[in-house]
Structures are given as structure tokens and as C-alpha cells.
Amino acid sequence: MRFRFLSGGHRATAARLAAAGALLSGAGGCSWADTIEVVDPDVINPQALASPAAATTLRNGVVLRLAQATSGGENVFLLGGLLADEWRSGDTFEQRNTTDQRTLIPENSFLAGAFRAPMRVYVESQTAIAVTRQYQPTPRANIGLMFALGGYAANLIGEHFCNGIPYSTIVDGKVVDGAPEPFDNSFIRAIAFADSALREVSGPAADSARVTHLASVVRGRALLNRGQFAAAAAAVTGVPTSFIYQAFHSANSTTNQNWGLNSNSRRYVISDVEGGNGLPFRTANDPRIRTAAGTGTRRLAFDTETPFFETTNFAQFGPVTLLSGIEARLIEAEAALRAGNPTQMLSTLNALRTQAVGGVAGLAPLTDPGTENGRVDLVMRERAFWMFGTGHRLGDLRRLVRQYNRPIESVYPTGIFHKGGGTYGTMAVLPISFDERNNSNFTGCTDLRP
């Protein structure tokens, strides 16, 4: 078996090389085939996978891919938050400005990497599982971890992208183009992967608390996205509030781009009541989101016109929390609200605020807003402030429309766009990149509903 990971970019490169070879075929007696004969770095020899060391390398590769797919590049954490209300564009690049304005199109070149990166985690986790199961079957927690991370990636894809998601696969070294699927299938995939992870770590000999907690939160989050609130709460009930699973960065791997594109290059700006519907991430002065105004030469963003505000939540090589026990409690609070128990909802939220969890102290207790809409707003606000910049916000805006029947224009930024004139558009999801049309089964999003 040969494992080959292709993208539209690889196919396009091959076509360009072939054309160049045709032009050179008569020059200097060289064969055009000789001209384009290269070693494909994406083709892995079967022999290279047949060892315990290869299994370790593949698993480490999935962990690295996960960091790249979340906070190691300009991916769904940033673009999703830009489409929602976490970030504003302080840039001159049209790709970021149109995402912020909710007018982005599939030809937006930043979408290719944003879609490809979590999909690689999903696909490559399965390769790592197969090789680990054959050549390094113990401890089984290693296999469970790969299932949990693959499930996390599938859930992230479903939260951010439109209906019509193609899950392509690799069979005997060949790409099998996936057919478009509704985004809800991504949540179903995530639940199945989480269940597999939990099976791997069941029993005394295979137990791993870290993988158990990770898979449980993945499962709870995907169930929440499907509107199965009671099941979501049940999935996370055993996860301690102190649990965290993080993506790490270093000078030898990747820079944390939440820092890189905000604090360093000033292309992303902390948003504040964006488009009237956005939350006051800056002016709330909430200790969960530490913000500062730019001064001196940093007074303005990269575009030299947008006032610059940064968050010091993220450092250049600092970790980013992907899933946590705090998220588990927030799932339980929302489930209590949906079960008609606002008292339990409020108790759960206040326990987080008053116990100084997550390194945050000084949060005053909340009071009951007294109405159903007010309580929903409260839960979503707490989620937004606890999990800022970690790939949750766009999924929550979509759920407000899909599960709470709120009009899109009462949830997303709307009205006059904050830079360059004009108004906000109507996009509520990330479309799948035009590059994916290399897939013979894919012709674009089947619809753009949240």
C-alpha cells in the first residue's frame, strides 16, 4: 500500500510541470519526461511505515498538523472569528477584509489552507491509527488519542464550513474523491471517532485519563452541535474542570498565529460590538480577554487607518487551549437551560466564575436575566469570553440561528461595515475553497445555511 496525500495545489503543480516539459522536449536532446522527473515528497514508501518508529512519527505528525490547523496558521480559529465578531480586519488584504465584511467568496485564497489543514488531521489520523495498531498496539491510549484528534478535526470542519463537505480518502495510494455531505455528517463522524477513542482506553490496562477526558469533550461538543443537549451533558459529566488539552508552539515548529497576526503584524484587531450584534470583547474589560490599545507607531493597524487593539492572551510560542473542563461545564450549563432548569444553569456558570478556574480571578457572580432569551444570551456570552480565539465562536453563532431560531441578521455583524464604506454582506459560514473543484464530485457548497 502507498499512502499519498494530494491536494488541488499538487495537481495544479503537476499540470504546470507537464506543460513546461512539453516546451523543453526538443531542447538539448533532453526528454521532457526526464525534465519533470522528481521525487514526490507526499509519497511515503510502504517500507517506511512498517515499524514502531514509523507509528510514533505518524502520530507526532498528526499532533503537529493539529497545531497548524488551529493556531499555527491562518485557519479556522482566525478566519471563523473574523467572519463572526471576535476579530476585525486591520489589513489591506482583500481576503481578510471580505471575510470580515461577510462577503467572502470560494475564490478567497485563504480558504484553501483553512479547509485543507483540519482535513489533513482527520485523514492522517486514520493512517496513524492503522500503522500504530499493527506495529505499536500498546499502549492503546496512543490509538485512542488519534481517534480523539481525528474526531476533533471533523467537528471543527462541521462548525465552520458550508453544507456540501467532501471527505476524500486514500485507498491503495490513490485519492478517492469524496462526495458532498451535509455539515451535520461531520458531527456524526466526530461522535463515532470519540466513541472509538473511548473504547480504546476502556479497561484498567488501557486506561488513560487524558484521552478519556479529551474524547469526552469532543463527543459532548459534537452532540451539542447536533442539538442533543442532555446527551452532550452526560458525555462530559466525568471531565474535571481542571482538564485542558492544548496545541503547543515553539521556534522549532510554529508561531502561535493568534499572536502573530494580532500582536505582531497588527493585521487582526480585537473586535468590539461589531456590526451592532457583536459582543464587547474589548470594552467589557473582562479579565478573561486581556486587551490593550496600540500606542506610538502601533497606534494604528497594518492598514494605517484602523485603530489597533491587541489581546495579550496569546504569546508567540505560548500554547492554545483547544478543549477543556471549562468547556465541559459550559456544555452542562446550556443543557440545564434547555432542560428548563435556569437555577442549575446559573449555579454552573457561577461556579466557574467564582472558583478562579483557568487562571482567571475576580469575576463577579451572575444574576438570572429572568427571560429565556436573556438566559440564552448569558450562556453564549460566557462561552464567548471563556473560549475566545479558540475556534468556538462561529459555531455558536450558527447554533443561535439553527437551534434557537434567531434571524441571521440579529446574530451576525450587520449594518455599515467599519472600514472602507459599504455594508456587511450575508455570509454566515465559510465556503469551501474553489481549489476543491479538483475533486470530480465537488461543484461548490450545496447551500450556505448556518
Image: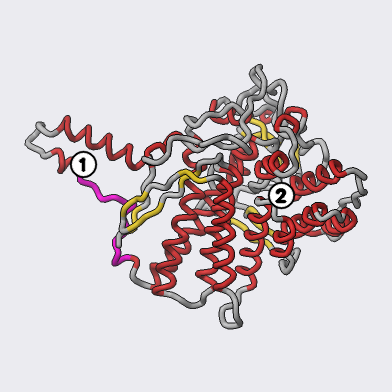
* Numbered tag placed on residue 444 in the rendering: none
Q: Main secondary structure of the magenta part?
A: loop
* Secondary element type, mark 2: loop
Magenta-drawn stretch contains 45:
yes
Range of magenta residues: 36-48
Residue at figure coordinates x 77%, y 58% from the top left: 332
Residue at figure coordinates x 42%, y 49% from the top left: 168
What amino acid type is highlighted by mark number 1? Ile
Quarter the C terminus occupies = top right
* Numbered tag placed on residue 36 in the rendering: 1
Name the N-terminal-most of marks 1 and 2: 1
Residue at figure coordinates x 40%, y 53% from the top left: 169
Percent across and percent down for residue 125 are 47, 60
Graded by Cα atoms within 10 Å as few (under 14), some (14 to 19) or many (20 or more), the crowding at tag 2 reads many
Q: Which residue is mark 2?
A: 387
Residue 423 lies left or right of residue 336; in this view the side is left
In the image, 119 versus 181, the foreground residue is 181
What amino acid type is highlighted by mark number 2? Met
In the image, 131 versus 297, the foreground residue is 131
* Secondary element type, mark 1: loop
Q: Residue furthest bottom?
A: 205
Percent across and percent down for residue 151 are 55, 58
Does the rendering let one see residue 331?
yes
Quarter the N terminus occupies = bottom left
Circles 1 and 2 in contact, beta carbons < 8 Å: no
